[in-house]
Image (cartoon, coloured by chain):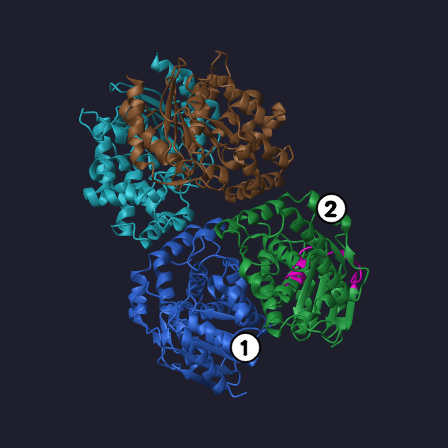
Chain colours: A blue, B green, C brown, D cyan
Amino acid sequence: MDYQLELQRAVDAARPVLGTGRVADYIPALGAADPTAFGLALATVDGQVYGAGDWQVPFSVQSISKLFSLALALATGGEQVWHRVGREPSGTPFNSLVQLESEQGIPRNPFLNSGAVVVTDLLLTLTGDAGHAVREFLRAESGNPRLDTDPQVAASEAAHGHRNAALAHFIASYGNLENPVEAVLAHYYAHCAIAASCRDLALAGLFLARHGIRADGSRLLSRSDAKRINAVLLTCGTYDAAGDFAFRVGLPGKSGVGGGILAVVPGRGTLCAWGPALDRAGNSVGAVTALDAFTTATGWSVF
Amino acid sequence: MDYQLELQRAVDAARPVLGTGRVADYIPALGAADPTAFGLALATVDGQVYGAGDWQVPFSVQSISKLFSLALALATGGEQVWHRVGREPSGTPFNSLVQLESEQGIPRNPFLNSGAVVVTDLLLTLTGDAGHAVREFLRAESGNPRLDTDPQVAASEAAHGHRNAALAHFIASYGNLENPVEAVLAHYYAHCAIAASCRDLALAGLFLARHGIRADGSRLLSRSDAKRINAVLLTCGTYDAAGDFAFRVGLPGKSGVGGGILAVVPGRGTLCAWGPALDRAGNSVGAVTALDAFTTATGWSVF
Amino acid sequence: MDYQLELQRAVDAARPVLGTGRVADYIPALGAADPTAFGLALATVDGQVYGAGDWQVPFSVQSISKLFSLALALATGGEQVWHRVGREPSGTPFNSLVQLESEQGIPRNPFLNSGAVVVTDLLLTLTGDAGHAVREFLRAESGNPRLDTDPQVAASEAAHGHRNAALAHFIASYGNLENPVEAVLAHYYAHCAIAASCRDLALAGLFLARHGIRADGSRLLSRSDAKRINAVLLTCGTYDAAGDFAFRVGLPGKSGVGGGILAVVPGRGTLCAWGPALDRAGNSVGAVTALDAFTTATGWSVF
Amino acid sequence: MDYQLELQRAVDAARPVLGTGRVADYIPALGAADPTAFGLALATVDGQVYGAGDWQVPFSVQSISKLFSLALALATGGEQVWHRVGREPSGTPFNSLVQLESEQGIPRNPFLNSGAVVVTDLLLTLTGDAGHAVREFLRAESGNPRLDTDPQVAASEAAHGHRNAALAHFIASYGNLENPVEAVLAHYYAHCAIAASCRDLALAGLFLARHGIRADGSRLLSRSDAKRINAVLLTCGTYDAAGDFAFRVGLPGKSGVGGGILAVVPGRGTLCAWGPALDRAGNSVGAVTALDAFTTATGWSVF
């Protein structure tokens, strides 16, 4: 297969929809993104990386970082994460507080904001610096030492973070936070505000396509845990549109409101697409379209 | 791989949990099932079938029939089914009316009772006899001409069917039923009350492992539609425990309160496990355990 | 006080808003009502009755009948009604199924559709004919022997009654109906479809202003039970706008989607206003306005 | 009527239930209250005050302060409070976040925690010191200059206040707070943590029985606004048991988790009962029982 050609075709397929949807503007720093920017990268399990469009332009990873914080919490702390967060699709928006109330402070899954706050709290306890841990992991896997948190975005998140503060205090009221709310949120914003490119993220996610093996050949996660993260990605990784994403793209994936989506093709590689304009569920219109086109053309799907 | 050996090992793995959980008793006919019965069958894409335990004993397929009614509605009516039912996990129990109210009579997915009632209504419109259509399909694929609806179970469902009648009238109040409530429910019960064995169901589900091709080599569904059904199975097929099933078993699957679970290994085959005692979500404790053991041992997983 | 003058002033106050709101059209028979019709009647505890506007024109009482079925169920069956229905405001629309699910088939209060279905079921068990019982009571209290159920409206309700059928089956699924769903609904429609005028209803409600005493001087309810019905009217009688109605009008009252509102001034009398156009909560815009004007002018309020 | 005798009889009626229910223990300072303490006071519109039991013992007023902050916000700022908070019963627990989400940050009524936080925010904007304003008002009306906030209770509330912090941040995320979350909560705790006796509170609430007139004869609220507060008290003042309180006691009232309930008999006077053990809804078991007994014996009820 000519990967470069397929990537270019998928980018071309996304072009017509790039005007559709809406750039996230809940913080000013995100609202400034160019809605017509678009990139797509493919990293294969042997560590090769290919790209088309703006695949080397850094963007705000936002919720894609939740995948890495979960992997690191599992790698460091083992099963305990599943005592504090579930792994079921929520059927509700990513920042909803409703289920948290009926389920007594145990978030439905680690990819809701509430779940990611709990995972960040655990990672903070385990490592002493959750933001640093995620950042270092992304640098190591991508081989990009300049990859970093955008301090302006992190500050902007904190300044406009009443909803996340509400979630965190609510979880704390049920006794499901170990660290002070302010500290947990600071680390949560630190990893959400990391800027990385499609290239960086595709490389950083390869351990999930390699059944747990990192770029340097060491094992981060057991084969079983790597599969399990893929399962949670597929059922919960793209907000309350996970069913539709599975239906159209057929791969485990994690999206962020910065417009990126990182998808895993177990045993083959990873794809990362980026376009800032989002659909109603918060997923990039262009990225879903490109991934749909790519998987349809290549037959790459877990189904 | 010695399939027979692996099946036997998986059955053995399930034995210790067969006393756990609770046999569905909302209708007397189901409540009489033996909680220690257990069977497991494997059908491979070449049409071979293997089994262990009570794999040839018929049981009430219940919600597993929803998978076949969906496939037939798609095969016969095409995309229109997606105008009347969604494909997102619900995050709520299979017989809940709550979301239906906020979503104006459009069921969240075709595997909720509400969604299956809508699919049955469509299939009734398309074929004139939805119960017959499902039954004939199962007979043809399994090669078992004696496979039939258990009239006692169907009558019992109808007699204890206030909850489903509520769902159907509720959907009708939003204009999302074409046929009379009573007719739709009769056909719904007709396919849910089919009695079939693990062997029969594994063979009947093979078209999903064969990317749309039936036992006789004809095409039921496009490759794309077959994949899509697998995607919906994975995200929505095992009630509000779909996340956990994906996490543990890692395969698309559909469960029924009769204790059966039919799982698909795309490109390889199908597995059907059966044990009547259910967990809180309504999935067979023994069947989940056996499928978990089998997929762990064989490495068969979509992730 | 010149009652006639005050009634006329209140009707005049309502005139400007009679174009506002929307006539109920969920059944054709109601949709034909003239949105500019308006009437107001006052019955005093000594049995005198005064009126202005279209106060002698019959209209469909709809949910106002729930007040009478509750009073008769209490008078005939005593406290048992409170074992099957609550007395708390619901905070949700009158035909919602949501709370019924979380509260296991016990309706929040007797003035929700669900609650009134349960009360009708009880009254059917107690009297053998719930529709007849309500009708006879209204005839006796109003002294109007021609007051009757409108068969066309009752038939129309049944024909468009999927939502109520859903409620009734749902309640039955929790074991909170004693009679067949169809029978209960037939009696429910029979009393909702009674046609009566402001005059008739004001007279029929006087027992609540007289602390339980009927027109003929006999006691229907204990003083305590009459007060209690007034309390439930105030907190639950005007759908999910009960708070606003108490705030503006300050009287116990029951509204119907036919456009009527019957309000009680304990120890003094009853008011019945009617105008077909409804606000979003289902209360008559004109009737609320007239009652607000009347109580503001007269100082009649329980507060 | 021999008020003293009736008060004593009501206290006696409450004695047998004083062991029932549970003292609020979400903060240590409240958990230390003696569950067998009990007091009842009556203040008449002429300013006389009567009492029985522990009617002069100060207790933590908690949510009863919400009544005073609402009255002061209305007196100072007029109708604007109703742009930021509703006046409907919620049908949900006092500290629930669920409705706030579906209703976009507008609390259902001013007596929910969320509503009281918004009222406190408004009062803070209007007066510069909401805690001080409530305290001074209570001192003036009760004639008790030593009445004060218990700093230990206020500190304890803040230290255990994750749930309220969640509510406040959630409201702020919808733009319905004008002041910083921390400041609003500090003032909220300052007025909730006021310690006052049944005597103090009965006197302080008299303006509602006097249709808006303060102890010194000046007018705090218009007659209409005083009635309206009584209406909101009746429909929303006793958490999600407002219907039952109206049913049993038949008076507008406000309860607090400190065990107090202040009830208004319009035109006659006020009653304040106190017993620390609470029922499931958060209302004092003893206080409801005593008020029920008193109103039954005296016939004092708005219905």
Which amino acid is tagged 2? Ala
* Residue C197 locus on image (x, y percent): 44, 25
- Circle 1: element type: helix
In the rendered image, residue B59 lying in the magenta stretch gets the answer: yes
Crowding at mark 1 (Cα within 10 Å: few <14, some 14-19, many 20+): some
Relative to A199, residue D256 above or below? above
Residue A114 lies in quadrant = bottom left
User: Are dots 2 and 1 in contact, CB under 8 Å?
Assistant: no
- Mark 1, residue position: A296
Marks 2 and 1 on same chain: no
Residue C229 relative to residue D52: left or right? right
Residue range (magenta): B53-70
Callout 2 crowding tier (Cα within 10 Å): few <14, some 14–19, many ≥20: some
Q: Chain of mark 2?
A: B
For disc 1, the chain is A
Considering depth in this image, is D109 or D114 the residue closer to the camera? D109
- C-alpha gap between disc 2 and disc 1: 45 Å
- Which residue is more in the foreground, B249 or A173? B249
Report if residue B31 is visible in the image.
no
Horizontal placement of B263 versus C246: left or right?
right
Asked if the stretch drawn in magenta spans residue C28, the answer is no
* Residue A208 at x, y percent in the picture: 52, 75
The numbered dot on residue B155 is 2
